[in-house]
Amino acid sequence: VRPGALSGRHVIVTSGPTHEPIDPVRYIANRSSGAQGAAIAAALRDLGARVSFVTGPAEVPPPEGVEVIRVQTARQMRDAVESALPADAAVMAAAVADWRIRNSSARKLKKDGTGKPPSLEMTENPDILAWISQPDARRPRLVVGFAAETNDVVAHATDKRLRKGCDWIVANDVSEGTAIMGGTENAVTVITEEGAEDWPRMAKDAVARKLAQKIADALG
Ligand code: C5P
């Protein structure tokens, strides 16, 4: 590792789940721990980058030495990413909720005695990765997205890279039996314009360091 390979560079990292409110006391969430995102932020910091770490309510604490911006919802995450621009690179490791509740309530929902449950309508959240990948003046030079797949990993991730407009997709196989989700190790395939690179199974920290080094090499 060349220390300082990213000094003078600004990198935005998103991490963790988002929480989408139903009412003031209830929300929809997912099981993302934020482990891989936190490890990536720490690895970028170790190479000298200034890191804006935009995190949902994760289990894993944020690393030291990065600027932590805490958010709850996907829309807050999008706004925080926008406020952190400009950046040389963006790594979108968050597990952003695809939907939020359209008719979320400012008051706690109550049983009304009829036995009829409330009906929740969903609406789509902004896709932060697709949005930041749009080719305009503020687009970071390098945008990295993630993909958790259970089958045909390379085909789906290659398709996702084109659909989202990002430069790289870090894809992992989260099918049953891999023990990757919630585990300490990861086995990823990195999809770039040049094709697919299979990385051997290694600790999430080691994946983070290898990815940070690859980002440093790409930014030159
Ligand atoms: O297809 P999918 O949405 O699962 O792709 C995952 C990638 O997109 C991840 O990098 C994730 O952080 C990003 N994403 C996002 N905003 C969303 C949904 C996904 O940035 N609303």
Image: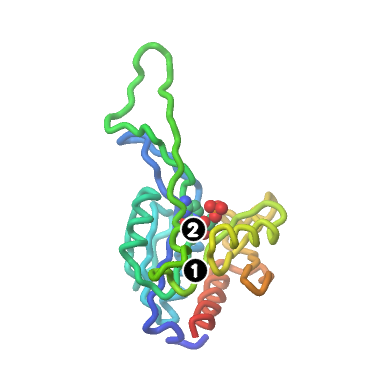
Image location of residue 76, percent across then percent down: 34, 52
The residue type indicated by label 1 comes to: Val
Whether the residue under disc 1 has CB within 8 Å of ligand 1: no
Residue indicated by mark 2: 130
Q: Nearer the viewer, mark 2 or mark 1?
A: 2
Q: Is residue 151 left or right of residue 127?
A: right
Q: Is residue 219 left or right of residue 196?
A: left
Q: Is residue 79 left or right of residue 94?
A: left
Residue 165 seen in the figure: yes
Image location of residue 162, percent across then percent down: 60, 61
| Residue at 31% in and 63% down | 83
Q: Is residue 156 left or right of residue 184?
A: right
Q: Quadrant of residue 181?
A: bottom right
| Residue at 49% in and 61% down | 93
Whether the residue under disc 2 has CB within 8 Å of ligand 1: yes
Residue indicated by mark 1: 143
The residue type indicated by label 2 comes to: Ala
Image location of residue 159, percent across then percent down: 64, 58
Image location of residue 27, percent across then percent down: 39, 38
| Up-down relation of residue 53 to residue 156 (above or below) | below
Q: Quadrant of residue 63?
A: bottom left
| Up-down relation of residue 123 to residue 49 (above or below) | above
| Residue at 48% in and 68% down | 39
Nearer-the-camera pick, 54 or 141 = 141
Q: Residue furthest front?
A: 136
Sequence-first disc among 2 and 1: 2
